[in-house]
């Protein structure tokens, strides 16, 4: 789940090089299921690990998947872990990677996983690997919402959550300063690849099946999965993928990545990598914050992230998927009905924007803007203009491009689509920011079975009043996620151009063919480009 930033908008968004698989580096894992079911011990190829009993699961918190990216390894690709002697105590969560100073916390020695294993023992369980969101500058595997114990228990699966480098440390292209650092702009992606490689090598020690790995992520984490799907042979890292609220076109272009790096470095008059190496973690975060001053809206929310670099990500995501880059991967994708309502948690005025303030509307469709608004308004009688505009923005940024990605993959493998519609019930008379819909991130407590909705207006009271119904919805979502991970079938029909079958997560649940089809079709003439919006002022 995202944490609040002290800017005008919240962070919104949160490729395979086989040489990075690190198989020869990590050693062979012990036989499948070697972790004792009751005493929470595992014998990996790196060394023995002591976990922590957590109800009916074992949790292993802070197991390293790569060497600390510190000292000479700062801004370098992840390196292998040095095996340890004795037993590693993995019983306390790590603080995560350095991030926005207004949030605090995090250390550069942060390349760790958290693992949850059902305590009943057994081997060859499906594996779910989670990549958190947070605009690639916030977030941590240790967020309580991402605790995988309930999901592991209910699904009889092994759940893994991953920390990866954020912000300037993980997503800044320094090849323009020194060719030896070319590709550093995707080091966060390289960290994720290293983590998935670690899973293949070591997860058998925790009872998981390295031949049945599903990666799932939300927002920025989902966008990273998109980038991996566009790589060469992603099926060598994972067999299935679940993309939650993160369409592939939000992967940056190479030109954008270079421009963002130029802007960031200029903010600190940085001309050499040595200058960056000499800075403390806090100084780097101050530089990052300085560079983002004056950057607002989507340019701020999507400042960092994976990019099409010609190597890890050879080309635009949806084009690559349509051409079959992920033909060996089964895919499930989805969005929330009111994604952009999330921004109102930080800036309530976003719910009151008139059509004239909708400046991110695509220029090629400018002559259709009013007509499209009228269609959306007709489908939402009585709602104020700001709500209608937010529905259009959700479709532009999330729903419609996600459906394009689903259609591209459906050419090759069965693909499944969902839409999360449940929200805290509206109360007449309350301000708009207290009556929010199915916003960005709201599905996560349900997916993990951790029904803490305190971060959402009236969320705690709603859970207290409707716990049985909401628990049932959460259980059904957990069952779908783990059923997909186990066998590639979540429990509803696959998505095709003819039916556009979509699972609606709400009370009651249902399957609809082509929901909001008249609105989706309005975007048919628009070809969503990869992300290349450079909206911040130049330094100088």
Image (tube, helix red, strand yellow):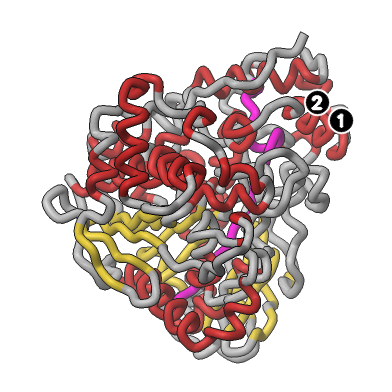
Mark 1 residue element: loop
| Residue 410 against residue 271 in the figure, above or below | below
Q: Residue at x 72, y 22 (%)?
A: 264
| Quarter of the N terminus within the rendering | bottom right
Residue 276's label in the rendered image is 2
Q: In the shown orientation, is residue 401 left or right of residue 205? A: left
Q: Is residue 156 visible?
A: no
Query: Which element type, helix, strand or loop, lies under badge 2?
Result: helix
Horizontal side, residue 511 vs residue 463: left or right: left
Q: Is residue 495 left or right of residue 104?
A: left
Q: Tell me if residue 170 is in the magenta stretch.
A: yes
Please name the residue that numbered disc 1 is placed on.
279
- The image position of residue 406, as x and y in percent, is 28, 48
Give the extent of the magenta segment.
156-174
Label pair 2/1, CB-CB below 8 angstroms: yes
Check the picture and name the quadrant holding the C terminus.
Answer: top right
Observer-nearest of 226 and 74? 226
Who is closer to the viewer here, 375 or 423?
375
Residue drawn at (75%, 15%), measured in percent from left and top? 266
Position of residue 502 measured from the top left corner of the image (x, y, whole percent): 27, 60
Residue 155, given in percent of the width and then of the height, sits at 43, 79
Q: Is residue 329 above or below residue 524?
A: below
């Amino acid at each position: 789940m995202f944490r609040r930033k002290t800017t005008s908008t919240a962070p919104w968004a949160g490729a395979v090089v086989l040489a990075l698989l690190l198989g020869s580096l990590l050693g062979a894992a012990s036989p499948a299921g070697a972790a004792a079911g009751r005493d929470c011990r595992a014998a990996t190829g790196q060394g023995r690990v002591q976990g922590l009993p957590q109800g009916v699961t074992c949790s292993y918190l802070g197991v390293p998947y790569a060497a600390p990216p510190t000292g000479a390894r700062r801004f370098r690709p992840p390196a292998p872990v040095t095996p340890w002697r004795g037993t590693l105590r993995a019983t306390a969560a790590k603080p995560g990677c350095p991030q926005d100073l207004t949030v605090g916390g995090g250390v550069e020695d942060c390349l760790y996983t958290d693992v949850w294993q059902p305590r009943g023992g057994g081997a060859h369980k499906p594996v779910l690997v989670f990549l958190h969101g947070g605009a690639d500058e916030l977030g941590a595997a240790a967020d309580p919402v991402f605790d995988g114990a309930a999901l592991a228990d209910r699904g009889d699966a092994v759940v893994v959550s991953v920390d990866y480098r954020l912000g300037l440390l993980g997503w800044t292209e320094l090849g323009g300063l020194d060719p030896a650092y070319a590709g550093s702009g995707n080091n966060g992606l390289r960290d994720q690849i290293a983590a998935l490689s670690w899973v293949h090598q070591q997860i058998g020690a925790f009872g998981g099946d390295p031949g049945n790995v599903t990666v799932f992520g939300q927002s920025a984490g989902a966008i990273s999965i998109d980038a991996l799907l566009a790589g060469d042979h992603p099926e060598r890292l994972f067999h299935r993928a679940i993309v939650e609220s993160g369409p592939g076109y939000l992967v940056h272009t190479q030109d954008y990545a270079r421009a963002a790096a130029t802007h960031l470095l200029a903010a600190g008059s940085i001309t050499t990598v040595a200058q960056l190496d000499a800075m403390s973690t806090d100084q780097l975060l101050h530089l990052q914050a300085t560079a983002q001053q004056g950057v607002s809206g989507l340019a701020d929310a999507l400042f960092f992230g994976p990019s099409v670099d010609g190597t890890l990500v050879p080309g635009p995501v949806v084009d690559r998927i349509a051409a079959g880059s992920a033909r060996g991967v089964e895919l499930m994708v989805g969005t929330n009905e009111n994604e952009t309502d999330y921004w109102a948690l930080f800036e309530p005025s976003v719910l009151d924007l008139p059509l004239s303030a909708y400046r991110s509307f695509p220029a090629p469709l400018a002559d259709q803007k009013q007509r499209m608004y009228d269609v959306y308004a007709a489908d939402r009688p009585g709602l104020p203009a700001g709500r209608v505009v937010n529905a259009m923005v959700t479709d532009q940024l999330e729903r419609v491009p996600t459906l394009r990605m689903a259609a591209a993959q459906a050419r090759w493998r069965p693909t499944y689509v969902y839409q999360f519609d449940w929200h805290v019930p509206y109360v007449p008379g309350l301000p708009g920011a207290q009556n929010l819909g199915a916003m960005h991130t709201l599905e996560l407590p349900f997916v993990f079975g951790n029904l803490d909705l305190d971060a959402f207006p009236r969320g705690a009271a709603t859970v207290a009043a409707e716990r049985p119904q909401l628990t049932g919805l959460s259980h059904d979502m957990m069952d779908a996620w783990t059923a997909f991970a186990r066998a590639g079938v979540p429990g509803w029909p696959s998505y095709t151009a003819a039916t556009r079958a979509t699972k609606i997560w709400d009370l009651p649940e249902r399957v609809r063919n082509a929901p909001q089809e008249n609105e989706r079709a309005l975007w048919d003439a628009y070809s969503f480009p990869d992300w290349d919006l450079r909206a911040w002022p130049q330094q100088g």
